[in-house]
Image: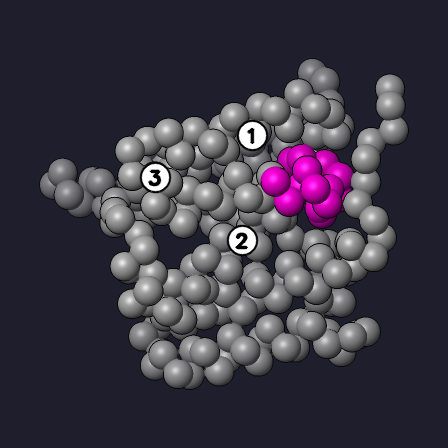
């Protein structure tokens, strides 16, 4: 078996800070938007969180987050950047997105992400017939994930939605830089993103049930 391609150590360290900066700043801005915090205050807090993560050494939040959770997935960081952008520039975000309801393939990706997380969790506890995680270092898994990532773009109107490009861009960065660990599974999924996907799926189910009711 060939040696898996791993990211450069310097690139890994840069991503540790950049990734967590996107997660905290973007996720924090989205949370504050849900709490109806004024727009200017959202921007100030997002800026502070981003600068805090980018500080060097153990003064940085990324240092402690990295010890506890390692680096975030590329897709998770991009998703946080997207929701943060929507929270900090709501007028521009509403003008860019062409639909408020989830597209069918986006729903499929959320379901696939949640199921993949459960499979990886079972693999962690050695409950699968064969190891799943090591397959993420190979080309077949990367090809399969790439096919799933571009499927949303085939639906009418999807190419004009920023959210439909998150997974393809995440995999492109993985191909170029092998972030964050050289394993394709880590590029598209992490424990926090997995939890959020369950929340998104439950929210969609609730909205669907409420609409039908």
Is the Cβ of the residue at disc 3 closer than 8 Å to that at disc 2? no
Picture coordinates of residue 59, whole percent (x, y): 76, 78
Picture coordinates of residue 117, whole percent (x, y): 57, 36
Q: Which residues are magenta?
A: 172-187
Depicted 21 relative to depicted 197: above or below = below
* Extreme residue in the left direction: 213
SS for callout 1: helix
Asked if residue 125 can be seen in this view, the reply is: no
Mark 3 or 2, which is nearer the eye? 3
**Which residue position is annotated with label 2?**
78
SS for callout 3: helix
Depicted 164 relative to depicted 83: above or below = above
Q: Is 48 contained in the magenta span? A: no
Q: Residue at x 43, y 78 (%)?
A: 42
Nearest the viewer among 125 and 2 is 2
Nearest the viewer among 53 and 147 is 147
Disc assigned to residue 146 = 1
């Amino acid at each position: 078996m060939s040696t898996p391609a791993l990211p450069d150590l310097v690139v890994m360290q840069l991503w540790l800070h950049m990734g967590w900066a996107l997660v905290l700043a973007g996720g924090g801005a989205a949370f504050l938007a849900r709490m109806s915090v004024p727009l200017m205050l959202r921007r100030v807090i997002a800026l502070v969180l981003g600068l805090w993560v980018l500080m060097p050494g153990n003064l940085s939040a990324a240092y402690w987050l990295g010890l506890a959770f390692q680096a975030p997935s590329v897709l998770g960081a991009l998703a946080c950047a997207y929701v943060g952008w929507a929270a900090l520039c709501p007028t521009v975000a509403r003008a860019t997105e062409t639909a408020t309801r989830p597209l069918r393939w986006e729903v499929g990706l959320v379901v696939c992400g949640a199921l993949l997380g459960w499979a990886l969790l079972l693999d962690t506890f050695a409950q699968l017939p064969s190891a799943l995680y090591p397959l993420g270092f190979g080309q077949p898994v990367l090809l399969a994930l790439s096919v799933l990532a571009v499927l949303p773009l085939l639906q009418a109107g999807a190419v004009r939605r920023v959210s439909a490009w998150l997974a393809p861009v995440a995999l492109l960065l993985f191909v170029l830089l092998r972030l964050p660990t050289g394993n394709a599974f880590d590029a598209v999924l992490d424990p926090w993103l997995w939890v959020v996907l369950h929340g998104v799926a439950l929210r969609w189910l609730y909205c669907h049930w409420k609409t039908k009711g």
